[in-house]
Image: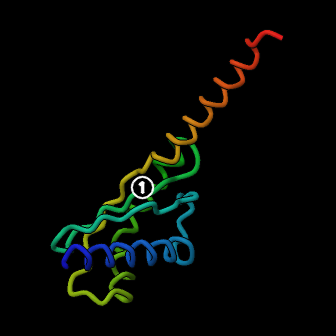
Amino acid sequence: MAGHRMARMAEEIKRELARLLRDEMKDPRLGFVSITAVEVSGDGRHAKVYVSVMGDESARDNSQAALKQATGFLRTELSKSLRVRYVPELVFLSDLSIERGTRIARLLTEMENHDDAEAPR
């Protein structure tokens, strides 16, 4: 039962953080950020927020710095919308799965093109 409650809380945090990043954050360092997942600890006091940032390493670093600096603001805003006793401490982590998937797709396309070029006609 507690696991189901934490999963619901994680989804609510994900939805609300996405809204806050889209509508409330004005930091110019914040690039195109997508929240891919949120994991809430069993006691609800800690949350790992996985983010994907479009762009290069510099854009990722700048966005991470902006998110780290805005953690207090984001927790305060979450406290207004979540009905919980404790708003979890937020830790933002890079999610590189989208980039890995894109890289794999590109490599597969290159292999396919290479095979087509080598095929005898």
Residue 105: x, y in percent?
60, 37
Quarter in which the N terminus is drawn: bottom left
Residue 54: x, y in percent?
57, 51
Count all numbered tags in the image, as a single digit. 1
Q: Is residue 48 above or below residue 99?
A: below
Q: Is residue 53 above or below residue 25?
A: above
Quarter in which the C terminus is drawn: top right
Instruction: State the residue lying farthest toward the top.
Output: 120
Residue at 19 percent of width and 77 percent of height: 2
Front residue of this view, candidates 60 and 3 = 3
Residue at 39 percent of width and 82 percent of height: 77
* Disc 1 secondary structure class: helix
Residue on which disc 1 sits: 65
Say whether residue 12 is left or right of residue 89. Answer: right
Front residue of this view, candidates 46 and 8 = 8
Instruction: State the residue lying farthest toward the left.
Output: 43
Instruction: State the residue lying farthest toward the right.
Output: 121
